[in-house]
Amino acid sequence: MAGAARGAAAGAPGAAAGPRVARVFAELAAEVPFVAPEVLERAAGAPFRARLGANELARGPSPAALAAMRAACARAGLYGDPSSEALRGELARRLRVPERAVWVGSGIDDLMNQVVRLVVEPGDPVVSSRGGYPTFDFHVRASGGRLVHVPYRPDFVQDLPALGAAAREARAKLVYVSNPDNPMGTWNSGAAIQELLDRHLPGDCMLLLDEAYAEFAPQGAVLPYADPTSDPRLVRLRTFSKAYGLAGSRIGYGVACPEAVVGHIHKFRQHFGVNGVAQAGALASLLDADGRLGEVVADNRRGREQYAALCDRLGLGHLASGANFVAIDLGSEPRASALLEALRTRGVWVRKPGVPPLDRFVRVSVGSEAERQVFEEELPGALEDIAGLA
Protein backbone atom coordinates (compact mmCIF):
# COMPACT_ATOMS: atom_id res chain seq x y z
CA MET A 1 0.00 0.00 0.00
CA ALA A 2 2.78 2.39 0.93
CA GLY A 3 4.57 1.47 -2.30
CA ALA A 4 1.42 2.23 -4.31
CA ALA A 5 1.13 5.60 -2.62
CA ARG A 6 4.76 6.39 -3.42
CA GLY A 7 4.18 5.37 -7.04
CA ALA A 8 1.18 7.68 -7.35
CA ALA A 9 3.15 10.53 -5.80
CA ALA A 10 5.95 9.96 -8.29
CA GLY A 11 3.59 10.31 -11.24
CA ALA A 12 2.18 6.81 -11.71
CA PRO A 13 -0.89 6.48 -13.97
CA GLY A 14 -4.12 7.57 -12.31
CA ALA A 15 -6.38 10.58 -11.98
CA ALA A 16 -4.91 13.66 -13.66
CA ALA A 17 -3.44 16.06 -11.11
CA GLY A 18 -2.12 18.57 -13.63
CA PRO A 19 1.47 19.39 -14.65
CA ARG A 20 4.06 20.36 -12.05
CA VAL A 21 4.76 23.99 -12.86
CA ALA A 22 8.02 25.53 -11.65
CA ARG A 23 7.48 27.12 -8.24
CA VAL A 24 8.59 30.59 -9.31
CA PHE A 25 5.77 30.71 -11.90
CA ALA A 26 3.16 28.97 -9.78
CA GLU A 27 3.65 31.62 -7.08
CA LEU A 28 3.95 34.56 -9.49
CA ALA A 29 0.99 36.90 -9.98
CA ALA A 30 -0.25 37.29 -13.55
CA GLU A 31 1.08 40.50 -15.08
CA VAL A 32 1.25 42.30 -18.42
CA PRO A 33 3.72 45.21 -18.33
CA PHE A 34 1.82 47.24 -20.95
CA VAL A 35 -1.74 47.22 -22.27
CA ALA A 36 -1.38 47.30 -26.05
CA PRO A 37 -3.10 50.07 -28.02
CA GLU A 38 -4.82 47.44 -30.16
CA VAL A 39 -6.59 46.15 -27.04
CA LEU A 40 -7.85 49.64 -26.27
CA GLU A 41 -8.89 50.25 -29.87
CA ARG A 42 -10.92 47.03 -29.94
CA ALA A 43 -12.63 48.04 -26.72
CA ALA A 44 -13.41 51.48 -28.14
CA GLY A 45 -14.46 50.13 -31.53
CA ALA A 46 -12.30 52.63 -33.40
CA PRO A 47 -8.61 53.27 -34.13
CA PHE A 48 -6.75 56.07 -32.38
CA ARG A 49 -6.30 59.30 -34.30
CA ALA A 50 -2.95 59.87 -32.57
CA ARG A 51 -0.94 56.88 -31.35
CA LEU A 52 1.40 58.60 -28.90
CA GLY A 53 1.89 56.03 -26.17
CA ALA A 54 4.62 53.65 -27.36
CA ASN A 55 7.46 55.96 -28.44
CA GLU A 56 7.44 54.58 -31.97
CA LEU A 57 8.86 56.34 -35.02
CA ALA A 58 5.75 57.39 -36.92
CA ARG A 59 7.59 57.72 -40.26
CA GLY A 60 8.69 54.07 -40.02
CA PRO A 61 11.79 52.51 -41.61
CA SER A 62 13.92 54.29 -44.18
CA PRO A 63 13.17 53.63 -47.88
CA ALA A 64 16.44 51.69 -48.10
CA ALA A 65 15.42 49.50 -45.17
CA LEU A 66 11.98 48.86 -46.68
CA ALA A 67 13.57 47.86 -49.99
CA ALA A 68 15.96 45.48 -48.25
CA MET A 69 13.13 43.94 -46.25
CA ARG A 70 10.98 43.45 -49.35
CA ALA A 71 13.87 41.68 -51.03
CA ALA A 72 14.44 39.53 -47.93
CA CYS A 73 10.77 38.47 -47.97
CA ALA A 74 11.61 36.33 -51.02
CA ARG A 75 13.67 34.19 -48.64
CA ALA A 76 11.09 34.13 -45.86
CA GLY A 77 10.77 30.38 -46.28
CA LEU A 78 14.34 30.01 -45.00
CA TYR A 79 15.66 30.55 -41.49
CA GLY A 80 17.56 33.75 -40.89
CA ASP A 81 21.28 33.68 -40.15
CA PRO A 82 21.41 32.52 -36.51
CA SER A 83 24.62 34.47 -35.90
CA SER A 84 23.43 37.70 -37.61
CA GLU A 85 26.98 37.91 -38.92
CA ALA A 86 26.56 40.71 -41.47
CA LEU A 87 24.71 42.93 -38.99
CA ARG A 88 27.10 42.18 -36.15
CA GLY A 89 30.06 42.94 -38.37
CA GLU A 90 28.70 46.36 -39.35
CA LEU A 91 27.80 47.18 -35.74
CA ALA A 92 31.27 46.19 -34.55
CA ARG A 93 32.87 48.33 -37.25
CA ARG A 94 30.82 51.39 -36.35
CA LEU A 95 31.23 50.99 -32.57
CA ARG A 96 34.90 49.99 -32.88
CA VAL A 97 34.47 46.94 -30.70
CA PRO A 98 35.31 43.27 -31.41
CA GLU A 99 32.60 41.49 -33.38
CA ARG A 100 32.44 38.74 -30.77
CA ALA A 101 31.42 41.39 -28.20
CA VAL A 102 28.17 42.04 -30.10
CA TRP A 103 25.08 39.84 -30.07
CA VAL A 104 21.66 40.36 -31.64
CA GLY A 105 18.20 39.65 -30.24
CA SER A 106 14.56 40.36 -30.99
CA GLY A 107 14.49 43.79 -29.40
CA ILE A 108 15.76 45.12 -26.07
CA ASP A 109 13.14 43.21 -24.08
CA ASP A 110 14.52 39.92 -25.41
CA LEU A 111 18.12 40.98 -24.74
CA MET A 112 17.18 42.15 -21.26
CA ASN A 113 15.53 38.84 -20.49
CA GLN A 114 18.67 37.01 -21.62
CA VAL A 115 20.87 39.06 -19.30
CA VAL A 116 18.53 38.58 -16.35
CA ARG A 117 18.41 34.82 -16.99
CA LEU A 118 22.19 34.75 -17.12
CA VAL A 119 22.69 36.52 -13.80
CA VAL A 120 19.63 36.22 -11.56
CA GLU A 121 18.82 33.12 -9.53
CA PRO A 122 15.83 32.77 -7.15
CA GLY A 123 16.27 35.08 -4.20
CA ASP A 124 19.04 37.19 -5.74
CA PRO A 125 18.70 40.96 -5.09
CA VAL A 126 18.51 43.20 -8.15
CA VAL A 127 18.59 47.01 -7.98
CA SER A 128 16.67 49.44 -10.20
CA SER A 129 14.90 52.80 -9.95
CA ARG A 130 11.40 52.81 -8.46
CA GLY A 131 8.96 53.43 -11.30
CA GLY A 132 11.45 52.78 -14.10
CA TYR A 133 10.89 50.64 -17.19
CA PRO A 134 8.45 47.97 -15.92
CA THR A 135 9.49 45.19 -18.31
CA PHE A 136 12.83 44.90 -16.52
CA ASP A 137 11.06 44.25 -13.22
CA PHE A 138 8.82 41.78 -15.05
CA HIS A 139 11.84 39.71 -16.12
CA VAL A 140 13.45 39.84 -12.68
CA ARG A 141 10.30 38.58 -10.98
CA ALA A 142 9.98 35.79 -13.57
CA SER A 143 13.50 34.66 -12.63
CA GLY A 144 12.66 34.67 -8.93
CA GLY A 145 14.86 37.68 -8.19
CA ARG A 146 14.21 40.11 -5.35
CA LEU A 147 13.82 43.71 -6.52
CA VAL A 148 15.41 46.51 -4.53
CA HIS A 149 14.04 49.86 -5.68
CA VAL A 150 15.74 53.25 -5.30
CA PRO A 151 13.75 56.51 -5.63
CA TYR A 152 14.50 58.96 -8.41
CA ARG A 153 16.13 62.23 -7.46
CA PRO A 154 13.72 65.16 -6.83
CA ASP A 155 14.40 66.33 -10.41
CA PHE A 156 13.26 62.90 -11.71
CA VAL A 157 16.74 61.85 -12.79
CA GLN A 158 17.93 58.38 -11.79
CA ASP A 159 20.08 58.58 -8.65
CA LEU A 160 23.24 56.74 -9.67
CA PRO A 161 25.17 57.00 -6.36
CA ALA A 162 22.07 55.78 -4.50
CA LEU A 163 21.74 52.84 -6.90
CA GLY A 164 25.36 51.95 -6.22
CA ALA A 165 24.88 52.23 -2.46
CA ALA A 166 21.81 49.99 -2.62
CA ALA A 167 23.78 47.44 -4.63
CA ARG A 168 26.54 47.39 -2.03
CA GLU A 169 24.12 47.10 0.87
CA ALA A 170 22.05 44.34 -0.75
CA ARG A 171 25.10 42.57 -2.27
CA ALA A 172 23.24 42.76 -5.58
CA LYS A 173 24.44 40.92 -8.68
CA LEU A 174 22.75 43.30 -11.12
CA VAL A 175 21.87 47.01 -11.38
CA TYR A 176 19.64 48.33 -14.16
CA VAL A 177 19.90 51.89 -15.54
CA SER A 178 18.16 53.32 -18.61
CA ASN A 179 19.89 56.36 -20.09
CA PRO A 180 18.09 58.41 -21.35
CA ASP A 181 15.42 57.20 -19.01
CA ASN A 182 12.06 55.70 -19.77
CA PRO A 183 9.47 56.85 -18.60
CA MET A 184 10.77 60.31 -17.62
CA GLY A 185 13.05 61.20 -20.53
CA THR A 186 15.74 62.55 -18.19
CA TRP A 187 19.35 61.49 -18.43
CA ASN A 188 22.69 61.19 -16.68
CA SER A 189 25.94 62.13 -18.37
CA GLY A 190 28.24 59.49 -19.74
CA ALA A 191 30.78 60.69 -17.16
CA ALA A 192 28.27 59.99 -14.38
CA ILE A 193 27.71 56.46 -15.73
CA GLN A 194 31.48 55.91 -15.71
CA GLU A 195 31.66 57.24 -12.14
CA LEU A 196 28.95 54.76 -11.12
CA LEU A 197 31.15 51.96 -12.41
CA ASP A 198 34.40 53.32 -11.01
CA ARG A 199 33.31 54.58 -7.58
CA HIS A 200 29.92 53.24 -6.55
CA LEU A 201 29.30 49.79 -7.99
CA PRO A 202 30.65 46.62 -6.33
CA GLY A 203 33.39 44.89 -8.28
CA ASP A 204 31.26 41.78 -8.87
CA CYS A 205 28.00 43.57 -9.77
CA MET A 206 26.85 43.88 -13.39
CA LEU A 207 25.52 47.19 -14.75
CA LEU A 208 22.83 46.64 -17.37
CA LEU A 209 22.71 49.90 -19.33
CA ASP A 210 19.59 50.28 -21.47
CA GLU A 211 20.32 52.80 -24.24
CA ALA A 212 17.13 52.46 -26.29
CA TYR A 213 16.93 56.26 -26.75
CA ALA A 214 20.65 56.97 -27.14
CA GLU A 215 20.29 58.36 -30.68
CA PHE A 216 18.11 61.18 -29.31
CA ALA A 217 20.32 61.94 -26.29
CA PRO A 218 22.03 65.31 -25.84
CA GLN A 219 25.77 65.64 -26.28
CA GLY A 220 27.71 64.03 -23.45
CA ALA A 221 24.88 61.79 -22.29
CA VAL A 222 26.15 58.60 -23.95
CA LEU A 223 29.15 56.84 -22.49
CA PRO A 224 31.79 56.40 -25.24
CA TYR A 225 32.28 52.83 -26.39
CA ALA A 226 35.48 51.10 -25.32
CA ASP A 227 36.96 47.61 -25.32
CA PRO A 228 34.28 45.58 -23.47
CA THR A 229 36.96 43.48 -21.78
CA SER A 230 38.20 46.59 -19.93
CA ASP A 231 35.23 46.32 -17.56
CA PRO A 232 33.33 43.02 -17.79
CA ARG A 233 30.61 44.39 -15.49
CA LEU A 234 29.17 46.67 -18.18
CA VAL A 235 26.47 45.36 -20.55
CA ARG A 236 24.96 47.82 -23.03
CA LEU A 237 21.69 47.29 -24.92
CA ARG A 238 20.56 49.20 -28.03
CA THR A 239 17.58 48.89 -30.36
CA PHE A 240 16.40 49.55 -33.89
CA SER A 241 12.86 50.15 -32.60
CA LYS A 242 13.12 53.89 -31.94
CA ALA A 243 15.31 56.06 -34.17
CA TYR A 244 15.38 53.49 -36.99
CA GLY A 245 11.62 52.86 -37.07
CA LEU A 246 11.76 49.05 -36.81
CA ALA A 247 9.71 48.54 -33.63
CA GLY A 248 7.43 46.01 -35.30
CA SER A 249 10.38 44.01 -36.66
CA ARG A 250 11.73 43.32 -33.16
CA ILE A 251 15.49 43.63 -33.43
CA GLY A 252 18.17 45.05 -31.16
CA TYR A 253 21.71 44.32 -30.03
CA GLY A 254 23.91 44.13 -26.98
CA VAL A 255 27.58 44.87 -26.40
CA ALA A 256 29.45 43.19 -23.57
CA CYS A 257 32.58 41.29 -22.63
CA PRO A 258 32.73 38.19 -24.86
CA GLU A 259 34.09 35.87 -22.18
CA ALA A 260 32.12 37.12 -19.16
CA VAL A 261 28.74 37.67 -20.83
CA VAL A 262 28.24 37.10 -24.55
CA GLY A 263 29.74 33.62 -24.66
CA HIS A 264 27.40 32.47 -21.91
CA ILE A 265 24.34 34.01 -23.59
CA HIS A 266 25.08 32.07 -26.76
CA LYS A 267 24.62 28.89 -24.71
CA PHE A 268 20.89 29.46 -24.20
CA ARG A 269 19.60 32.24 -26.47
CA GLN A 270 17.04 31.33 -29.12
CA HIS A 271 19.40 30.99 -32.07
CA PHE A 272 16.77 31.51 -34.78
CA GLY A 273 14.88 34.14 -32.77
CA VAL A 274 15.73 37.04 -35.11
CA ASN A 275 14.21 36.63 -38.55
CA GLY A 276 16.02 37.35 -41.79
CA VAL A 277 13.70 40.19 -42.81
CA ALA A 278 14.47 42.06 -39.59
CA GLN A 279 18.20 41.50 -40.04
CA ALA A 280 18.04 42.88 -43.57
CA GLY A 281 16.11 45.95 -42.43
CA ALA A 282 18.48 46.64 -39.55
CA LEU A 283 21.59 46.35 -41.70
CA ALA A 284 20.14 48.61 -44.38
CA SER A 285 19.14 51.11 -41.68
CA LEU A 286 22.72 51.31 -40.48
CA LEU A 287 24.09 51.77 -43.98
CA ASP A 288 21.49 54.47 -44.63
CA ALA A 289 21.93 56.18 -41.27
CA ASP A 290 24.36 58.94 -42.19
CA GLY A 291 21.69 61.07 -43.87
CA ARG A 292 18.46 59.64 -42.51
CA LEU A 293 19.32 59.59 -38.79
CA GLY A 294 20.07 63.31 -38.69
CA GLU A 295 16.63 64.06 -40.14
CA VAL A 296 14.93 61.81 -37.59
CA VAL A 297 16.77 63.40 -34.67
CA ALA A 298 16.04 66.94 -35.92
CA ASP A 299 12.34 66.18 -36.37
CA ASN A 300 12.24 64.68 -32.89
CA ARG A 301 13.82 67.82 -31.45
CA ARG A 302 11.19 69.97 -33.16
CA GLY A 303 8.45 67.76 -31.73
CA ARG A 304 9.78 68.06 -28.20
CA GLU A 305 10.01 71.83 -28.59
CA GLN A 306 6.44 71.91 -29.89
CA TYR A 307 5.21 70.04 -26.81
CA ALA A 308 7.22 72.29 -24.49
CA ALA A 309 5.68 75.40 -26.04
CA LEU A 310 2.20 73.86 -25.77
CA CYS A 311 2.72 73.06 -22.09
CA ASP A 312 3.99 76.58 -21.43
CA ARG A 313 0.87 78.07 -23.05
CA LEU A 314 -1.40 75.85 -20.97
CA GLY A 315 0.48 76.28 -17.71
CA LEU A 316 1.63 72.66 -17.50
CA GLY A 317 4.96 71.57 -16.13
CA HIS A 318 7.17 69.32 -18.25
CA LEU A 319 10.60 67.74 -18.08
CA ALA A 320 13.48 68.33 -20.46
CA SER A 321 13.74 65.14 -22.50
CA GLY A 322 16.64 63.31 -24.11
CA ALA A 323 14.30 60.76 -25.70
CA ASN A 324 11.50 60.77 -28.27
CA PHE A 325 8.76 61.68 -25.82
CA VAL A 326 7.99 64.34 -23.21
CA ALA A 327 6.78 63.79 -19.65
CA ILE A 328 4.06 66.32 -18.80
CA ASP A 329 3.28 67.13 -15.16
CA LEU A 330 -0.42 67.11 -14.23
CA GLY A 331 0.26 67.76 -10.55
CA SER A 332 -1.39 64.62 -9.15
CA GLU A 333 -2.01 61.00 -10.05
CA PRO A 334 -5.83 61.40 -10.22
CA ARG A 335 -5.46 64.23 -12.72
CA ALA A 336 -2.96 62.27 -14.79
CA SER A 337 -5.19 59.18 -14.90
CA ALA A 338 -8.24 61.26 -15.73
CA LEU A 339 -6.37 63.02 -18.54
CA LEU A 340 -5.44 59.67 -20.08
CA GLU A 341 -9.12 58.74 -20.20
CA ALA A 342 -10.23 62.16 -21.46
CA LEU A 343 -7.69 62.01 -24.27
CA ARG A 344 -8.65 58.44 -25.11
CA THR A 345 -12.26 59.45 -25.66
CA ARG A 346 -10.91 61.97 -28.17
CA GLY A 347 -8.90 59.34 -30.03
CA VAL A 348 -5.51 60.20 -28.50
CA TRP A 349 -3.51 57.45 -26.82
CA VAL A 350 -0.76 58.29 -24.33
CA ARG A 351 0.64 56.51 -21.27
CA LYS A 352 1.72 57.35 -17.74
CA PRO A 353 4.09 55.87 -15.15
CA GLY A 354 2.47 53.68 -12.52
CA VAL A 355 4.47 54.45 -9.37
CA PRO A 356 4.45 57.62 -7.24
CA PRO A 357 5.70 60.31 -7.51
CA LEU A 358 6.24 59.63 -11.23
CA ASP A 359 2.57 58.77 -11.70
CA ARG A 360 1.50 62.43 -11.75
CA PHE A 361 3.05 62.68 -15.23
CA VAL A 362 1.75 61.58 -18.61
CA ARG A 363 4.26 60.48 -21.23
CA VAL A 364 3.58 61.67 -24.79
CA SER A 365 5.52 60.32 -27.77
CA VAL A 366 6.72 62.83 -30.36
CA GLY A 367 4.89 61.00 -33.17
CA SER A 368 4.26 62.59 -36.53
CA GLU A 369 3.48 66.23 -37.25
CA ALA A 370 -0.15 65.26 -37.91
CA GLU A 371 -0.39 63.37 -34.61
CA ARG A 372 1.14 66.27 -32.71
CA GLN A 373 -1.46 68.55 -34.27
CA VAL A 374 -4.26 66.26 -33.07
CA PHE A 375 -2.78 66.25 -29.56
CA GLU A 376 -2.46 70.03 -29.55
CA GLU A 377 -6.07 70.40 -30.65
CA GLU A 378 -7.49 67.93 -28.14
CA LEU A 379 -5.42 68.64 -25.02
CA PRO A 380 -7.19 71.90 -23.99
CA GLY A 381 -10.62 70.23 -24.06
CA ALA A 382 -9.32 67.22 -22.15
CA LEU A 383 -7.91 69.55 -19.51
CA GLU A 384 -11.31 71.26 -19.20
CA ASP A 385 -12.87 67.84 -18.56
CA ILE A 386 -10.63 67.27 -15.54
CA ALA A 387 -10.64 70.85 -14.26
CA GLY A 388 -12.44 69.88 -11.03
CA LEU A 389 -9.83 67.33 -9.97
CA ALA A 390 -7.06 68.21 -7.54
Image: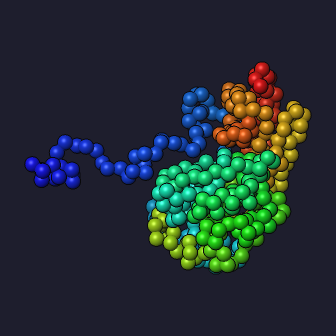
Q: Nearer the viewer, residue 325 or 156?
A: 156
Q: Residue at x 80, y 50 (%)?
A: 321
- How many marks on residues? 0
Q: Nearer the viewer, residue 65 or 216?
A: 216
Residue 244 in the image: x percent, y percent?
A: 69, 58
Image quarter (top left, top right, bottom left or bottom right) of the C terminus: top right
Q: Which of the colour schemes (rainbow, by chain, secondary structure, one colour) is used? A: rainbow
Residue 25 in the image: x percent, y percent?
A: 42, 49
Q: Residue at x 15, y 49 (%)?
A: 5
Q: Residue at x 71, y 68 (%)?
A: 197
Residue 288 in the image: x percent, y percent?
A: 72, 65
Q: Is residue 44 left or right of residue 377?
A: left
Instruction: Name the quadrant containing residue 277.
Output: bottom right
Residue 254 in the image: x percent, y percent?
A: 61, 66
Q: Residue furthest front?
A: 169
Instruction: Name the quadrant containing residue 205.
Output: bottom right
Q: Residue furthest left?
A: 1
Q: Residue at x 89, y 37 (%)?
A: 312
**Residue 326 in sight:** yes
Vertical placement of 111 versus 312: above or below? below
Instruction: Name the quadrant containing residue 188.
Output: bottom right
**Residue 12 in sight:** no
Vertical placement of 358 versus 177: above or below? above
